[in-house]
């Protein structure tokens, strides 16, 4: 059984409880972040916690822990789960109990849930996946809040069509981000990804840094009707890493197989995370 951290205590997962009156439960008011380990080392933990802090600021949630405190608790929780080869880590800060059930009181609870990392289907990476687009715009997209109704709705629609992800499309027909991913497109030697109105992905940032000297990076919004001009597409996320996309809605991308440039990015990322896990990268 896994061990979690909840409000100052390390407890077995079945004993990890919060109040039914917490406004995260009642209103979906809270924030979270998600990361994984490489060789049991949490990947860019300070950056993930900084994003958690930024998410909280944007929705008006007061955190009672510093970045260093949260990082230390995450490391301790990983150490409490030595049976994991690698781990998924979910950091949650709840809204806390409110007298009127809606107004935050600055009494939220920190939870750290560490679970075994599960491998995703190998064919995602060798054959590529289908994604869909969906007409949804997230509220405060730069905040990773616990209000995930749009993502759950979009994922249900994606799965009904055999897709693994749904990409949000705004009223201007611009592609923004996936429910849990960021999107990249290759057009020739240019790598394009949306610049704003998205959650700033940690994996996205790593990919941009790894490829900036290899390809021309273009930060701009993508119109949905531009996709037929793109040579390759891939999505990025902490748990998914780099996933080649061969189909968007009914449109097949390129020759319907993962492209050479996408495979190159995958290799760059694989080498980087291996070095990170070995402690060769700070």
Image (cartoon, rainbow, N blue to C red):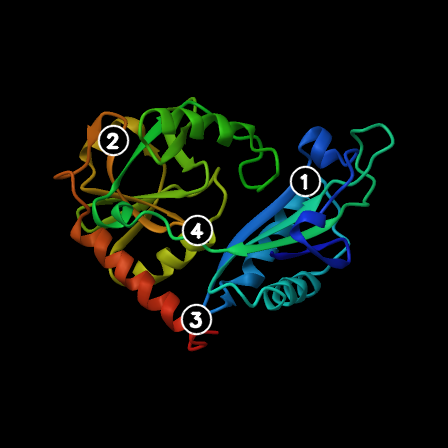
Of tags 1 and 3, the one toward the viewer is 3
Q: Nearer the viewer, residue 162 or 53?
A: 162
In the rendered image of this protein, does residue 105 appear above or below residue 69? above
In the rendered image of this protein, does residue 42 appear above or below residue 142? below
The image position of residue 45, as x and y in percent, is 55, 62
Of tags 4 and 1, the one toward the viewer is 4
The image position of residue 213, as x and y in percent, is 28, 63
Q: Earlier in the sequence, mark 1 or mark 2?
A: 1
What residue do we see at 87% from left, 31% from top?
99
The image position of residue 256, as x and y in percent, is 15, 38
Q: How far separated are the C-alphas under marks 4 and 1?
A: 21 Å
Quarter-of-image position of residue 194: top left
The image position of residue 239, as x and y in percent, is 43, 51
SS of the residue under disc 3: helix
Q: How far separated are the C-alphas under marks 2 and 4?
A: 28 Å
In the rendered image of this protein, does residue 68 appear above or below residue 120? below
Q: Earlier in the sequence, mark 3 or mark 4?
A: 4
SS of the residue under disc 2: helix
Q: Nearer the viewer, residue 211 or 161?
A: 161
**Where is mark 4, residue-wise?**
239
Q: How far separated are the C-alphas under marks 1 and 2?
A: 36 Å
**Where is mark 3, residue-wise?**
277
Image quadrant where one finds the N terminus? bottom right
Residue 34 appears left or right of 6: left
Tell whether label 4 touches label 3 (CB within 8 Å): no
Q: Which mark is residue 30?
A: 1
Q: How far separated are the C-alphas under marks 3 and 2?
A: 38 Å
SS of the residue under disc 4: loop
Q: Which mark is residue 226?
A: 2
In the rendered image of this protein, does residue 38 appear above or below residue 259? below
Q: How far separated are the C-alphas under marks 3 and 4?
A: 15 Å
How many other residues sit within 10 Å of disc 4, few (<14), some (14-19) or many (≥20)? some
């Amino acid at each position: 059984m896994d061990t979690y951290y909840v409000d100052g205590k390390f407890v077995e997962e079945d004993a990890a409880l919060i109040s039914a009156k917490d406004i995260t439960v009642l209103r979906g008011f809270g924030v979270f972040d998600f990361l994984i380990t490489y060789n049991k080392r949490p990947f860019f933990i300070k950056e993930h916690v900084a994003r958690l802090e930024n998410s909280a600021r944007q929705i008006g949630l007061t955190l009672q822990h510093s970045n260093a405190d949260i990082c230390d608790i995450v490391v301790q929780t990983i150490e409490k789960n030595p049976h994991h080869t690698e781990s998924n880590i979910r950091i949650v800060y709840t809204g806390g109990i409110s007298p009127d059930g809606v107004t935050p009181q600055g009494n939220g609870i920190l939870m750290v849930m560490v679970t075994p990392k599960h491998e995703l289907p190998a064919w995602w990476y060798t054959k590529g996946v289908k994604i869909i687009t969906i007409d949804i715009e997230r509220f405060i997209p730069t905040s990773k809040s616990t209000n995930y109704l749009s993502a759950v709705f979009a994922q249900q629609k994606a799965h009904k069509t055999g897709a693994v992800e749904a990409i949000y499309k705004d009223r201007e027909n611009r592609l923004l981000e996936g429910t849990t991913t960021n999107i990249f497109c290759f057009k020739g030697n240019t790598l394009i990804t949306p610049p704003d109105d998205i959650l700033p992905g940690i994996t996205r940032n790593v990919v941009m840094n790894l490829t900036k000297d290899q390809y021309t990076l273009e930060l701009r919004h993508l119109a949905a009707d531009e996709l037929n001009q793109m040579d390759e597409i891939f999505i990025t996320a902490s748990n998914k890493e780099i996933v080649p996309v061969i189909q968007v809605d009914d449109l097949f991308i390129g020759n319907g197989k993962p492209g050479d440039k996408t495979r190159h990015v995958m290799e760059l990322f694989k080498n980087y995370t291996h070095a990170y896990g070995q402690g060769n990268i700070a």
